[in-house]
Amino acid sequence: MKKQVLAALTLTLFATPVLAEHHEGKGPGGPRGPEHFISKIDADKDGKVSKAEWNAKGDTMFKESDTNSDGYITRDEAQAFHAKRMEKWKAKKAEWKAKQAAAGAEKAE
């Protein structure tokens, strides 16, 4: 039970920014908004997220976070997981900005 609660909290921690920033279309890091969020978790692509799909995503995130596989996520593991996610997001943001700059340069020519 504790593992499920911790997995749900972990998923909520990392899903909240995606849900909080309702941004249609593409932006830094790619598309955002509820539709994108659901599409990432909706394994059977029925347009809805079942509890099993939600739990599967949480289990995946738990496994990624629990780097020593002891069944617990420590503060250090959570911080490392978050830092890894942020670096990935920053790289996508930089890539998006480079594409935008290239598109702007092409229009100026």
Image (cartoon, rainbow, N blue to C red):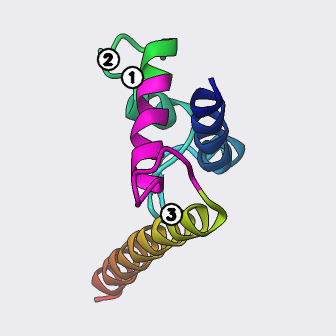
Q: Are marks 3 and 1 in contact (CB under 8 Å)?
A: no
The answer for how far apart the CA atoms under marks 3 and 1 are is 23 Å
Residue type highlighted by circle 1: Asp
Give me the disc on residue 81.
3
Residue 43 location, x and y as percent?
A: 32, 22
Lower sequence index among marks 3 and 2 = 2
Residue type highlighted by circle 2: Lys
Give me the disc on residue 18.
none
Q: Which residues are magenta?
A: 55-73
- Residue at 57 percent of width and 53 percent of height: 73
In the rendered structure, the answer to whether residue 52 lies left or right of residue 34 reads left
Residue type highlighted by circle 3: Phe
Q: For residue 105: magenta? A: no
Residue 36 visible in image: yes
- Residue at 55 percent of width and 48 percent of height: 72
Split into 4 quadrants, where in the image is the N terminus?
top right
Q: For residue 71: magenta? A: yes
Q: Where on the picture, by quarter, is residue 34?
A: top right
- Seen from the viewer's position, the closer of residues 2 and 19 is 2
User: Dot 1: within a 10 Å radius of its alpha carbon, few (fewer than 14), some, or many (20 or more) residues?
Assistant: some
Give me the disc on residue 42.
1
Q: Which residue is mark 2?
A: 45
Residue 52 location, x and y as percent?
A: 44, 15
Residue 4 location, x and y as percent?
A: 58, 28
In the rendered structure, the answer to whether residue 21 lies left or right of residue 7 reads right
- Seen from the viewer's position, the closer of residues 36 and 67 is 67
